[in-house]
Amino acid sequence: MAGNLLGAIGGVPLPETDVVVDARDVNKWFGRLHVLKDVSLQVKRQETVVVIGPSGSGKTTFIRCVNHLEKIQSGRIFVNGHLIGYRESSGGKLVEDKEKNIARQRQEIGMVFQRFNLFPHMTAIGNISEAPIQVRGVAREEAEETARALLERVGLAAKAGSYPAQLSGGQQQRVAIARALAMKPALMLFDEPTSALDPEMIGEVLEVMKELAREGMTMIVVSHEMGFAREVANRVVMMDEGQVIEEGSPDQVFSAPAQERTQAFLSKIL
Amino acid sequence: MTRRIGGIRPALLAGCLLLAGLTVAGCSSGKASVPTDWSIFWRSIFQPDGLILSGLWLTVSIAVISQTLGLILGILAALGRMAKAWPLRAVAGIYIWLFRGTPLLVQIMLVYFGLPAVGLYDFPTFTIPGINVAVPNAVQAGIVALSLNEGAYMAEIVRAGILSIDPGQTEAAKSLGMTYGQTMRRIVLPQAARVIIPPLGNEFNNMLKTTSLLVVIGVRELFVIFSYKNTTGSTSLQPFALFLACAVWYLMLTTIWGFIQARIERRFGRGAAGAVEEEGFLSRVFGSRGSSGSTVEGR
C-alpha cells in the first residue's frame, strides 16, 4: 500500500492560511435539541485532529457543519479563511450563501462517510473521475488517468472496472477516499470511516489514512481508533453533550485525561 | 359466524345463481342477426389494409410522444413538489391534483373543444418539416391532453423513485462540490431510473391503450379505424370480428412493448446487486409484474 497518495494527483494546494479550519462558538439545534454548544476548534495546516466522544456528543454533526451539510444557528466556521455556508449581512447576522457558492467551497473540502456512499451505478474509475469531470471540467482521459493512479496508490488497481456492489467494505472505503482526493482538497473530513467495516478490513483503510496524514494532508477524523490516533494524530479532541471538553496530544488525552468524563469514556472503549 | 349452506355464504350463493341465470338467458336469446364473417378477422390481422396500418402508426406515435412528454413533465413536477421554494411546490401540487383528480375523457374534451372556444389557445396548422406530414388539430390536442394527464401520474412515480435513493448519495455528491442540478442529473435520477422504469413501462402499456379515448375528438387511431369499418362498406356490422381483431392488435403492441421493457430494465440494472435477473417468456407476457390498477375509465 506504500506510495505517494498526493503524488498521484500532482499534490494538493497548500492551504492558504496557517489555520485551515477555524470554528468559533458554533451553535446548532435540531428542533429543541441543542446539539452543538459554543464549539470552537482550530485545525492548523497539515495537522491531523482526531475527534472522539460518546455517540450523541455532536462530533459527527460538527464535522458535517464544516462542509455545510448541516446548517448552524450561530457562530462562524472558516475554512482556508473563507466563511463556510453563509454570508454576513450588514447587521452581522448569518445569511445562507447561494447554492453555487457553497458548492464551490465544498470542492476544497473532501469528505469520507461512515457508509462510503459510493455511487452504485458507476465503476470505481467512474466514481473517482465523476466530480473532476463535472465540477472541475477536467478532460475525461486526464481524470481517468488520475483516477487509475489513485486506485493504484490505495492498492486497488485491479478493481478499476468494478462496481461498488462487487467490492468489499474496505475496498469501497478506499475508493471513497480516492474519490475525495481526486478533487485535490485542502482539507479532508473523515466521519467514522471504519465504523461500518468488518474488523479485518479496518486495517487497510487506516493504512491509507495514515499515509495521507504522513504526506501532510490536513485532516479532521471522527473515530474511536485509538491506535490510529496515537500514531498520527497531532491532537485529540474529546466532545461530550455538544461541547469540546478536552483537547491535547494523544498521549496527554489517552494516558492522563484531565476530565472525569474523558476517563469514563476511555475506560469503556479501551 | 354466518350460517352457511354447503359451506358457502347464502348471499354469495344467491349472487352466483343470479349470474349463472343471466348468462344462460343471454346465450339463449336467439340467433345472431348477422353471422360472424371470420375472414374479416383474419384479413384484419394478416392482411391489414392501409387504414389499419395508418391507425396503428398513429396510435404508436401518439403514445410514444405523449409518454415522452409526460415523463419530462413528470420529472419537472416531481422536482417542483420537492423544491425548497413554496411557489414551485404549490404549482406542482396543484397541477398534479387537477390532472389526477379529473377524468382524462373530460380533459381531452376541454383541451380540444374548450380551449379554442374561449380563445385561450388555438391549435395551429402544423406540418412536420422535412417529411411534409400535416398533424391535424385533433392529434395535437390529443397529445397535449394525454401528456398533461400522464405527467401528473409520472410525477408521483418519479418522486417515489427519487425518495427511494439513499440521502447519503446526495450528500456524497454535494461534498464533492456538485450543484443541485449536477447531483440530480448525474447521481440521483440515473439511480432512481431503476425504480421508475418498471412502473413507467406499466404507464406506457396503459398509454398504448388509452389513446383509444381520442375517439371522442376524432383522431383516426387504431380504435377509430375499426369503429369506422364497423359502420361502412363490406365490413359493416361485423362487430365481433372487427373488435376482436382490434383487440389482437392492441395485444400485439403491448406484448412487443413488454419485451422492449425487459431489455431496458436489464440495461438499467447495471451495478446494482441482484438487479440482473432474467425473466422467463411466460412471466414476461402474463406478468407477475404488479398490475397498474388504473383502467381507462379510471382516468
Image (spheres, coloured by chain):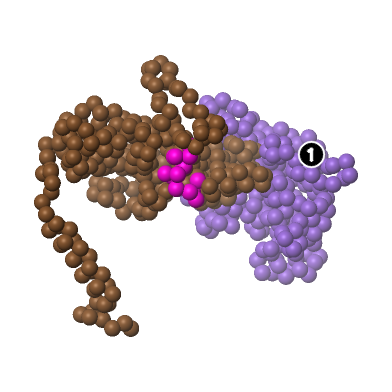
> A233 or B269, which lies in front?
B269
Residue A223, by quadrant, is: bottom right
> B275 or B236, which lies in front?
B236
The residue positioned 49% from the left and 37% from the top of the image is B114
Count of residue discs? 1
Residue A139 visible somewhere in the drawing: yes
The residue positioned 38% from the left and 20% from the top of the image is B133
Residue B246, by quadrant, is: top left
Residue A164 shown left or right of residue B238 in the figure: right
Residue A31 shown left or right of residue B170 in the figure: right
Are there few (<14), some (14-19), or many (20+) residues within 10 Å of tag 1?
some
Residue B195 shown left or right of residue A108 in the figure: left
From the top left corner, tell me how far across and down residue B190 is, in percent.
49, 40
From the top left corner, tell me how far across and down residue B196 is, in percent.
45, 45
On what subunit does the disc labeled 1 rest? A
Chain in purple on the image: A
From the top left corner, tell me how far across and down residue B126 is, in percent.
45, 22
Chain in brown on the image: B
What stretch of residues is rendered in magenta? Answer: B99-111
Q: Does the magenta stretch mainly form a helix, a strand or a loop?
A: helix
Does residue B61 show up magenta in the picture? no
The correct choice, above or below, for A87 with respect to A138 in the image is: below
Disc 1, SS: strand
The residue positioned 62% from the left and 47% from the top of the image is B90
Residue furthest out toward the right: A91
From the top left corner, tell me how far across and down residue B128 is, in percent.
42, 20
The correct choice, above or below, for B5 with respect to B142 in the image is: below
Does residue B101 show up magenta in the picture? yes
The correct choice, above or below, for A115 with respect to B226 in the image is: below
The residue positioned 69% from the left and 69% from the top of the image is A267
> Which residue has dot 1 on it?
A82
On-image quarter of the C terminus of chain A: bottom right
